[in-house]
Image (cartoon, coloured by chain):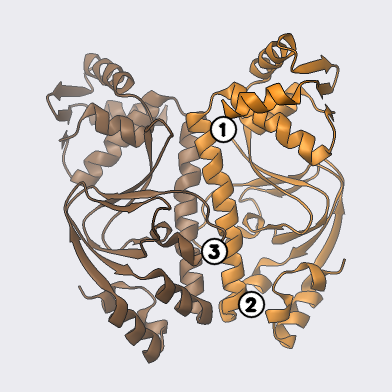
Chain colours: A brown, B orange
Amino acid sequence: MTFETTFPVWNKLNSSQQSKLLNTLITRKVEKGTIIHNGMMHCTGLILVKSGQLRAYMISPEGREITLYRLFDYDMCLFSGYCIMRSIEFEVIVEAEKDTELWVIPSEIYKSIMDESADVANFTNEIMGTRFTNVMWLIEQIMWKSLDKRLAAFLIEETKIEESNKLNTTHENIANHLGSHREVITRMLRHFQNEGIVKLSRGLIEIVDEDKLYSLVDE
Amino acid sequence: MTFETTFPVWNKLNSSQQSKLLNTLITRKVEKGTIIHNGMMHCTGLILVKSGQLRAYMISPEGREITLYRLFDYDMCLFSGYCIMRSIEFEVIVEAEKDTELWVIPSEIYKSIMDESADVANFTNEIMGTRFTNVMWLIEQIMWKSLDKRLAAFLIEETKIEESNKLNTTHENIANHLGSHREVITRMLRHFQNEGIVKLSRGLIEIVDEDKLYSLVDE
């Protein structure tokens, strides 16, 4: 895939905008675990994922994490280029959950094109609307759902992403996704194991009764 | 104030767009307590507050509420016109917290102008960025702050809005703002009273030690 075929409003740009983008575009390959963007320390630029998987999360003063949303192939990360909008005043950290290939569009270049093109500005609106929808879903989960239901939903999401019922992950890692503590997740996973829903071993969680997991979420 | 002086990007519109807006604009006066927009049952249109106070909140399947943000004079409510963007897929309820005068811009009119004007599209981006910032602040509060700190912060916010240390409000009302239960709020307010921070009487909360309230939030 090239940038031209991946960037959704490429055909709405005039040739001057197209060459401006291509001339300033940065291509990066990052390994799993790389922090690509770190809050408001630096306005990294807008990220377009070529292939791989990113996680956007926030962090408490004490270092607790909670996942806001994840980005997959062809997804765009707006908030790593937060300086394109004055009104965005929050910190997001973006890390690679898998080895990832991506493009970075410099913020000032994107902003100059967005300022003159209604198509690009409205495309940006739609991306922000999608992230807003992700985050509103998260508030619903935090506010109205108990942690066991959220854990069940997370395990289902993971089996879909990994296309496998065997998840190579740690309890610490799950706690960071859900904004919880490792001890709490361990206790809950052991409870799931006693119920015959999962089988636990070092660094591995195997889903053995998917139906029960789904019924937990829907309850 | 007229619509022309209140709508921030008025001068960026061409005369055809201006007359389109003026010809379709609806002026409304609503009483305190009126539900102006109710989730996704109807795409009400974009609301511009002339004077008054609105509250945007979400509601759980069991009817528990939590305030997302509030809107004051000259603020604009985007999500009451959610159908201008395909990617917005969440329900927000908007009610008048005070008697309010407002303008409603029909969604299809706003969308047609936003589609052709980069200025209007970018203005819309900035509003969405502001609301996103509000909501991210809310997640921080819910995730990392205990309810007593959130209650203290809410009481401080209220004294600022009302410009008074005497708040005419019920415990039920506060619970709805904070996504909590009335009993929990009553218990916490009684604790605040025992600490000499507030004085409670029927339908009234008086802040008697503002410094202590602030120190609770900053702790």
Q: Answer yes or no: do the residues labelled 2 and 3 have beta carbons within 8 Å?
A: no
State the image coordinates of residue A176 (x, y, percent, origin top left). 32, 34
Q: Of the numbered discs in the image, which one, if any, rests on residue B113?
A: 2
Q: In which quarter of the image is the C terminus of chain A?
A: top left
Residue A140 in view (yes/no): yes
Left or right side of A134 for B51: right
The amino acid type found where label 1 is placed reads Pro
Q: Are marks 2 and 3 on the same chain?
A: yes
Q: Of the numbered discs in the image, which one, if any, rests on residue B61?
A: 1
> Which residue does the image show at 53% across and 28% down from the upper left?
B145
Q: Answer yes or no: do the residues labelled 2 and 1 have beta carbons within 8 Å?
A: no
Quarter of the view holding residue B61: top right
Query: Which marked residue is nearer to the observer: mark 3 or mark 1?
Result: 3
State the image coordinates of residue A151 (x, y, percent, origin top left). 33, 29
Q: Which subunit holds the residue at mark 3?
A: B
Left or right side of B109 for B2: right
